Image (cartoon, helix red, strand yellow):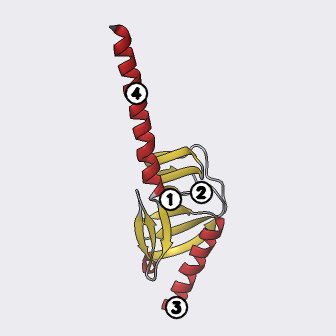
Amino acid sequence: MREKGAKGNILTSISIVVFTIAVLFVLVSMAGVKAKTDAIVLKGLYGKTIPYTSILSAELYNTDLPLAMVKVNGIGLGFIELGFIELGFYRIKDLGSARLFVLRRQKPYLLLRTSDDTILIGAGAEKNRELLERIQSEKEARQ
């Protein structure tokens, strides 16, 4: 009788692990960064729409992310094929409180500051540079 209970517990545990991994994979695969005509859109969990008009500063951040960041509310996954994924709210030594939207740990990152938020975007080095150019051209066009 005990063997049936043990097998049931093992199957239940495996089912929970598989379900959890599937949910995390779906949540992360929905994430993305897109430049629209009026805003940068961070899609997915912990996403946000950042109007160009609300961006006070935008720059490339060429510093490695520390391994010992304090996660306040977010997801940190190190086993996804894209590298270390960090989504959510973190405290980082040099930046203080920041929203991380790091899909690829590839420098340089894009650091945005608004009046109420510090946002660090990691969409890949090339994409981060493209986003910065887009933000700069939008700001120039509005002046």
Disc assigned to residue 101: 1
Residue located beneath label 4 in the image = 13
Whole-percent x and y of residue 43?
43, 64
**Label 3 close to label 4 by CB (< 8 Å):** no
Q: Is residue 54 left or right of residue 129?
A: left
> Marks 3 and 1, how far apart in space?
27 Å
- Neighbour tally class for label 1: few under 14, some 14-19, many 20 plus, Cα within 10 Å: many
Please state which amino acid type lies under the numbered disc 4: Ser
Image quadrant of residue 116? Answer: bottom left
Counting residues from the N terminus, which is met first, the one under dot 3 or under dot 1? 1
- Real-space Cα separation, disc 4 to disc 1, in angstroms: 31 Å
Picture quadrant of residue 46:
bottom left
Label 3, on which residue? 141
Neighbour class for label 2 at 10 Å: few (<14), some, many (≥20)? some
Badge nearest the viewer, 3 or 4: 4
Pointer 2 or 4: first along the chain? 4
Q: Which residue is mark 2?
A: 104
Quadrant of image for the N terminus: top left
Marks 3 and 2, how far apart at CA:
30 Å
Q: Does dot 2 land on a helix, a strand or a loop?
A: loop
Q: Quadrant of residue 61?
A: bottom right
Kind of element beneath mark 4: helix
Query: Which one is earlier in the sequence, the residue at label 3 or at label 4?
Result: 4
Q: Is residue 102 above or below residue 55?
A: above
Name the residue: 40% across, 27% down: 13
Q: Nearer the viewer, mark 3 or mark 1?
A: 1
Numbered disc in front, either 2 or 4: 4
Instruction: Judge whether residue 116 can be spotted in this image.
Output: no
Q: Nearer the viewer, mark 4 or mark 1?
A: 4
Q: Whole-Å distance between the Cαs marked 2 and 4? A: 31 Å
Q: CA distance from mark 3 to mark 4?
A: 56 Å
